[in-house]
């Protein structure tokens, strides 16, 4: 009898599939004698995509944890899958008993991206369509401080909302749902939205490219959009942003060996510090905090921000690499 394939469970979104196919390709390259197959599982978060996941008036951080991970973890625990691939920012810091975060491949760029309409394109389009009102566009290489007063920026992230308002309290923040392509389409078509913010890592994994002028290149990109990469001094990412997490059963030694070939050590140390910080803050993926850790030699540094109080709190520190976990706990204690 041929050996059973190793089942990699994943959500069915375009980004989840891109990430899972990347992991499967790395597995096949490292272990050509083994068979790896994807198993698509719909999560609670997927079922709620067409509706706001927060009840009216309820803060986003009050949402239940594991919206995009619980069903995948159940499949692991019940032996219906062998590995689960997550966007690490979606994975709760406390895992179910019997499961472990076994690998984090090399992280993508953690920055956020401001997406908005190109003024030149939409002026030209309106001129060619008599009677058509022009959608407001903006110039290339736009920074947050350049947004018009009272501009509408769409985001469903509490962290992004609070980060934006800390820089520009005059902005109007509106709710938005949908995948990367859907959100770009909404900005291109809806005049009441001036911009949205997306994770650069997700765009990169979906093969969207941003050229020097800010034009977005890729399949099915709406016409007339521009993008600006936001620096970490403007907006710190959420914990785990840009990283992929591979989760397995804690007692599966064969899969632990596979994951050993997938893991990027510096990324694992960095997200260990970030996730320890988030755990110490008592929050989930929608918690109004941001953090970014990076490794330099045998040292790891972590900077973090919290919007939980009326006054914004920031902290940063550096410790030896072996103390990544303690570093995250230290920063959380300072910001709580």
Image (cartoon, rainbow, N blue to C red):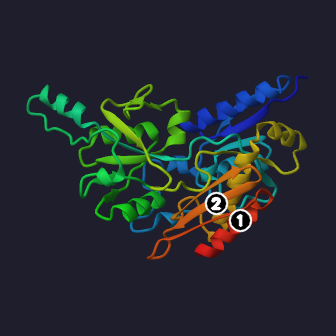
Quadrant position of the N terminus in the picture: top right
Q: Tell me: 83 left or right of 304.
A: right
> Residue 153: where, in percent of width, then height?
33, 52
Judging depth in this view, the residue of 66 and 270 nearest the camera is 270
Q: How many marks?
A: 2
* Residue positioned most to the left: 131
Badge 2 marks a residue whose secondary structure is strand
Examine the image and state in which quarter residue 35 appears: top right
Judging depth in this view, the residue of 212 and 16 nearest the camera is 212
What residue did someone put label 2 on?
Answer: 302
Q: Which mark is residue 327?
A: 1
> Residue 195: where, in percent of width, then height?
33, 47
Would you place residue 164 above or below residue 330 in this image? Answer: above
The residue lying at 68 percent from left, 35 percent from top is 39
The residue lying at 58 percent from left, 73 percent from top is 335
Task: Tell me the crowding category of disc 2: few under 14, some 14 to 19, or many 20 or more residues within 10 angstroms, Cα based.
Answer: many
Q: Which of disc 1 and disc 2 is earlier in sequence?
A: 2
Say if mark 2 contacts mark 1, CB within 8 Å: yes
Badge 1 marks a residue whose secondary structure is helix
Can residue 254 be seen? Answer: yes
Would you place residue 233 above or below residue 246 in this image? Answer: below
Q: Tell me: 264 left or right of 205.
A: right
Query: CA–CA distance between discs 2 and 1?
Result: 7 Å
> Residue 40: where, in percent of width, then height?
64, 37
Can residue 75 be seen? Answer: no
């Amino acid at each position: 009898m041929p050996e059973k394939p190793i089942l990699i469970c994943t959500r069915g979104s375009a980004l989840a599939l891109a990430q899972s196919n990347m992991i499967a390709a790395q597995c096949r390259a490292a272990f050509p004698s083994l068979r790896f197959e994807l198993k698509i599982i719909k999560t609670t978060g997927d079922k709620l995509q067409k509706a706001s996941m927060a009840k009216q008036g309820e803060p986003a951080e009050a949402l239940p944890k594991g919206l995009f991970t619980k069903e995948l973890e159940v499949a692991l625990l019940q032996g219906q899958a062998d590995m689960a691939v997550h966007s690490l920012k979606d994975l709760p810091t406390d895992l179910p008993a019997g499961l472990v975060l076994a690998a984090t491949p090399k992280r993508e760029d953690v920055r956020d991206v401001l997406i908005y309409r190109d003024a030149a394109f939409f002026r030209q389009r309106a001129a060619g369509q008599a009677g058509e009102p022009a959608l407001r566009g903006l110039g290339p290489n736009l920074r947050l401080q350049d947004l018009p007063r009272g501009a509408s920026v769409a985001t469903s992230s509490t962290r992004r909302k609070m980060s934006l308002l800390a820089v520009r309290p005059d902005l109007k923040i509106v709710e938005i749902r949908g995948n990367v392509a859907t959100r770009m389409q909404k900005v291109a078509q809806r005049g009441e939205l001036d911009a949205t913010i997306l994770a650069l890592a997700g765009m990169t994994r979906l093969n969207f490219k941003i050229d020097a002028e800010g034009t977005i290149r890729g399949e099915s990109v709406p016409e007339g959009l521009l993008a600006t990469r936001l620096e970490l001094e403007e907006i710190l990412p959420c914990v785990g942003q840009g990283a992929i997490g591979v989760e397995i059963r804690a007692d599966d030694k064969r899969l632990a060996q596979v994951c050993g070939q997938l893991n990027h050590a510096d990324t694992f140390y960095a997200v260990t510090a970030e996730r320890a910080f988030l755990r110490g803050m008592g929050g989930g993926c929608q918690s109004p905090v941001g953090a970014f850790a990076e490794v330099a030699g045998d040292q790891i540094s972590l900077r973090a921000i919290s919007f939980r109080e009326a006054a914004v709190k920031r902290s940063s520190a550096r410790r030896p690499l072996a103390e990544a976990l303690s570093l995250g706990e230290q920063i959380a204690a300072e910001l709580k």
